[in-house]
Amino acid sequence: MQIRFSDRPKGARSASIGGIVISKRGRDKSRPFVIIGIDGDFLYLADGALRKQVKPKKKKFIHVQITESISVEIAEKLAAGSLQDADLRKVLLRFEKNGEV
């Protein structure tokens, strides 16, 4: 009998660049972040205020709650290299007010 393990933990399949997550652990507990990078079991998160895009927070998948919200605008700007911290703050403010991006 052969047991297969996926490359990413459970729930990781729904995580994508530009997605909004809520921190479940650490001093930043309950804060929303935007996913700006994915590397194996880790997400790289930024919010434009506490964590800037030049120094993102490295967090494991199990320490965040992945939401259904994905900002296509952020993903496109990140791919183009024109993403700014103000863009992250604006998207997260919209998410906090409306519950969606």
Image (cartoon, rainbow, N blue to C red):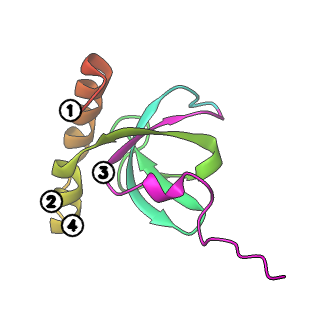
Task: Give the residue type that dot 3 points to.
Answer: Gly
Q: CA distance from mark 4 to mark 3?
A: 10 Å
Q: Is residue 94 above or below residue 67?
A: above
Task: State which quadrant residue 91 falls in.
Answer: top left
Q: CA distance from mark 2 to mark 1?
A: 15 Å
Main secondary structure along the magenta-highlighted residues: loop
Q: Which residue position is annotated with label 4?
A: 79
Instruction: Find the residue positioned furthest to the top.
Output: 97
- Give the percent coordinates (x, y) of residue 6: 62, 71
Q: Is residue 7 magenta?
A: yes
For residue 90, which numbered disc appears in the image?
Answer: 1
Q: Which residue position is annotated with label 2?
A: 82
Q: Is residue 45 magenta?
A: no
Q: Within 10 Å of the Cα at label 4, are there few (<14), some (14-19), or many (20+) other Cα atoms?
A: few
Q: Within 10 Å of the Cα at label 1, are there few (<14), some (14-19), or many (20+) other Cα atoms?
A: few
For residue 18, which numbered disc appears in the image?
Answer: 3
Q: CA distance from mark 2 to mark 4?
A: 8 Å
Is the Cβ of the residue at disc 4 closer than 8 Å to that at disc 1?
no
Task: Give the residue type that dot 1 points to.
Answer: Lys
Q: Residue at x 31, y 23 (%)?
A: 99
Say which element carries label 1. Answer: helix
Task: Give the residue type that dot 4 points to.
Answer: Ala
Between disc 3 and disc 1, the foreground one is: 3
Q: Residue at x 26, y 41 (%)?
A: 88
